[in-house]
Amino acid sequence: MAAENAEDDEMAKEKIRAIYGEEGLKKNYRELVGARAFPEIPASGRRTWDFDTAKELSQSIGCYIRSDKRTGEQLFWPLVKRVTISLPKSPALLEGIVLVDLPGAGDVSKHRSEMWKEKFLLGDEEHSDGFFDVFTVSSEQFKRIAQKKSNVLELNETELPYLEEHIKKLYVSHSVKEVKDYISDVSGIISHLHFSKDALSSKVQSSHSQEFNRLKKELNNMCTTLNKALSKVYNKLQDRLLMGTRAAEKACLRNATESVLKPTWCDNRGYHKTLKALCRNDGYYRSGKVGVVDLNYTLSEPMYREMNEKNLFLTTFGAGCSRASIKAIFSSFLVDLISKDLLKYHMKNNTEKYLRLVYIRTEQIKLHKKLEKEILKRKKLIYNSLSDSIQDTMKQTYQECSGIHGKSSFNQIQEKLKYKIETSKNTMFLKARDKMLKEFSNLQEFLVEEMDTQMTTSLKLALNQIPDDLTDLPGNQWKPV
């Protein structure tokens, strides 16, 4: 573990250099704490610049993103959480494309190291539950090739041409989708504007009332179907988590000891620093030498294993159109409420009704997109809820352990964590289970209520043209005059 010790020492030195310069390495703790003024570090924690050229940009932000010590200038990269670069609009730049440069493994910044725990969701990508393309590009070699200088790689070996082509495909796909959504929105608005002004006639009112009742009945059936389907998932999830809870209670101390507290693949000489770093980071640490050490996930792993035993989570939230997936239910919602055949029929035989149905269909598509985004956001929240709940239970102990120092600190930290796990196991995993079930239940309630409320509003707007019929729409608050 000598290499790990050296790595941790170097991380600490880099932070001191970033704040105090090279002279800081020669000062003691009291001298460092006594230095209060750091003119190069903004009090707000954020600094903004404007540049006209890429060269100026590169020169000015170098000390915040590079660790090249040959420059001789003060380097702040160990302290930087994020660098955001905004470029002016240009035909040469693809709008809506964001490039993210992730930090390296075992990054000195806790915030940047946490980025590795995040799950990147490719919102509208069909294969968002699978793998996404990674390009190990070499911009330096690409530049040398462009300048016709000597190089060690061929053009395609730099992978930049492949990355460029991939980004173009994403851009085209994104642009086509935006155009379709825009056309759909405009179509709905125009349809609403062209509603007949003869809506007050009893014949028209009767026709609209019948159509409203028919569609409302269909909507109620779909909401019931969605609620029943999600209730089945809830019950299955509850059963799997109950089994996972029992397994976690039995194996928690053994798993924690063998995988995190005293793993067989290391000795105490260097690993004590990893364990302390883990406590400082609330149960999670990523090192370039050791890799990821996550006590929260280790404790909750039996619950995740049971939950994933029959791909329950993936089937429910997956991009595929399995009958048990939420996506399949929404696809049915899009197709069945107002079918294409129904629209074609009324386009030929009843223009008035056709325009109203187009408006409803447009609002339906907009709602579908909104709910899909909400599902993606809550999907991550639900999945992470188990380990997050474990972290909440263990957090105070982590904080106490991070303050332990001295020769026997390693053993003290081990024993303190073991004691907390042993005394909390009867409630800790039940609490984690309840949190996941609660998050799922919240999503279920939200989806059913939004579908019912929003679509009922759209139906009333499209099929009731008398103001008195609209007073009970959601959000309307009528006050007597």
Image (spheres, helix red, strand yellow):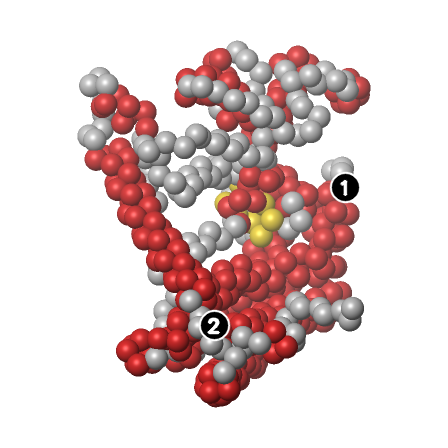
Decide if residue 22 is in sight here. yes
Residue 325 x, y percent position in the rendering: 43, 74
Q: Residue at x 30, y 81 (%)?
A: 349
* Local secondary structure at mark 1: loop
* Local secondary structure at mark 2: loop
Q: Which mark is residue 183?
A: none
Q: Is residue 50 left or right of residue 283?
A: left
Q: Residue at x 64, y 41 (%)?
A: 277
For residue 92, which quarter of the picture?
Answer: top left
Position of 235 relative to 68 (above/below): below
Q: CA distance from mark 1 to mark 2?
A: 75 Å
Q: Quadrant of the N terminus?
A: top right
Amino acid tagged 1? Gly
Front-most of residues 410 and 81: 81
Front-most of residues 204 and 244: 204
Q: Which residue is mark 2?
A: 197
| For marks 1 and 2 on the same chain, the one whose residue lies earlier in the sequence | 2
Q: Residue at x 49, y 53 (%)?
A: 119
Q: Which mark is residue 403?
A: 1
Pointer 2: residues within 10 angstroms few (<14), some, or many (20+)? few
Q: Residue at x 20, y 19 (%)?
A: 148
Front-most of residues 376 and 406: 376
Position of 170 relative to 444 (above/below): above
Pointer 1: residues within 10 angstroms few (<14), some, or many (20+)? few
Q: Is residue 319 left or right of residue 150?
A: right
